[in-house]
Image (tube, helix red, strand yellow):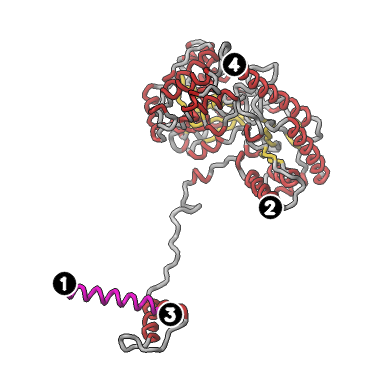
Amino acid sequence: MTCSCSFWARVILGRFTMQRAAGLVRRGSCPRASGPWGRSHSSAAAEASAALKVRPERSPRDRILTLESMNPQVKAVEYAVRGPIVHKAGEIEMELQRGIKKPFTEVIRANIGDAHAMGQQPITFLRQVMALCTYPNLLSSPSFPEDAKKRARRILQACGGNSLGSYSASQGVNCIREDVAAFITRRDGVSADPDNIYLTTGASDGISTILKLLVSGGGKSRTGVMIPIPQYPLYSAVISELDAVQVNYYLDEENCWALNVNELRRAVRQAKDHCNPKVLCIINPGNPTGQVQSRKCIEDVIHFAWEEKLFLLADEVYQDNVYSPDCRFHSFKKVLYQMGPEYSSNVELASFHSTSKGYMGECGYRGGYMEVINLHPEIKGQLVKLLSVRLCPPVSGQAAMDIVVNPPVPGEESFEQFSREKEFVLGNLAQKAKLTEDLFNQVPGIQCNPLQGAMYAFPRILIPAKAVEAAQSHKMAPDMFYCMKLLEETGICVVPGSGFGQREGTYHFRMTILPPVEKLKTLLHKVKDFHLKFLEKYS
């Protein structure tokens, strides 16, 4: 025991001496007085310094995760709606806050369909139900209407511990799925089964989840996913991430962005040389193009999918956003069943809806649902397994989705106020759609198709040859160059058409119509002035 203690004492004392000496070496202040063992501190320091030099310096270890070693599918993902131009807009906002002078006083973010960020007021009834669900003590308050309390109680009773803070089933809260099924039944006149309803984290989550099930194979057997061009960049991003094959079909800009089945046939025929086309994606009403598909067009698409054995994905998040009096929204599910059992019993379909669009505009809640038709029972099990890995969608988002599909009805206390607010939002959007279309079409070098629905304009812009050369010298796409100049000179942030896809030799940008009317007028006039100066400079 004594020997062991003596050994550790020498080790500790030696380490202390080395550390102290090394510290003196670093400070350059080694005294010459004799140390306690008959050696000078300078001698001890010299020994310590020599000992330190014996240990070789380590070079920084190579990083495990680099651009070269990372997942190449993730690196291939692009999402223009929040791309480089949006980052530049953020930098400009910071500069304005620091007092740096610009030719404008604010950045107008017209790049994304975020209604509340653009000043749209929330629908009162939805927020009342959400307040009650979030803080149930308010259920005893006389400040809330009984129909809001009734819905909140029903949702809470279906949650574990009567709390939105508990997990739900992976497929979603049962009573909310029942309400979604009832909504679809009312909308389509066709029965919907709650077992076919999957609540999701926004529609985007449902789309990416179903594509994960559909994508398989390698080489020429890789899954081909048909998407419209122009498209919402979520689709190309997920296709890249899953290492599937993007199969483009072009919408007809000269015919108000119509979908032509002959173009679908061309795309499938060419794709079969290098992949296995298995999925057909439809966005109706269109994003970014704003067209609303006719019933005849939907019938033709369904027949084509049946003929080619394609799985249909119907992105219908803008179903409440129809402004043209000549247009009407038709769901793919409704048309499918009206075409008869040959189609309704065989065509596989997934359709999607969301809290983010329509007249609610509740983007931040990330609520959504997916309805699947003719999905094999064993595949349903695989779908639930895939959803289970992520536990469940946010329960608050599920509750918000419930109010979207289960709003006040005639005879209920909140119905009149709800109807007024809904009509105001949709009427306001219709006014802004017409205003945007009319003003753009007055500008030489800008051509805008009718904005039949959704919440965006996608005008075609003339970019002179000199501007194309200038863009190439900056290693930019011409429409990116145009949009960057627009941002830097006016503070208006829009998304270049190249981020959505467009026919070669054409240029566009996408802009939301969500700003308040007066601000939208200012924005449109700024775009007009900028465009005329741009043409003059580069012509």
Q: Looking at numbered disc 2 in the image, what kind of residue is underneath it?
A: Arg
Q: Residue at x 70, y 36 (%)?
A: 508
Q: Secondary structure at mark 4?
A: helix
Quarter of the image for residue 432 reads top right
Distance, label 1 to label 3, CA atoms, is 35 Å
Mark 4 or 3, nearer chain start: 3
Q: Looking at numbered disc 1 in the image, what kind of residue is underneath it?
A: Met
Q: Looking at numbered disc 3 in the image, what kind of residue is underneath it?
A: Leu
Looking at the rendered image, the quarter that the C terminus falls into is top right
- Locate residue 438, reporting x and y percent: 78, 27
Mark 1 or 3, nearer chain start: 1
Q: Is residue 408 left or right of residue 372?
A: right
Q: Main secondary structure of the magenta part?
A: helix
Mark 4 or 1, nearer chain start: 1
Q: Which residue is mark 4?
A: 415
Mark 4 or 2, nearer chain start: 2
Res. 142 mark? none
Q: Can you tell which of label 4 and label 3 is closer to the viewer?
A: 4
Mark 2 or 1, nearer chain start: 1
Look at the image and give the residue range highlighted in magenta.
1-21
Quarter of the image for residue 21 reads bottom left
Res. 24 mark? 3
- Locate residue 130, reporting x and y percent: 52, 27
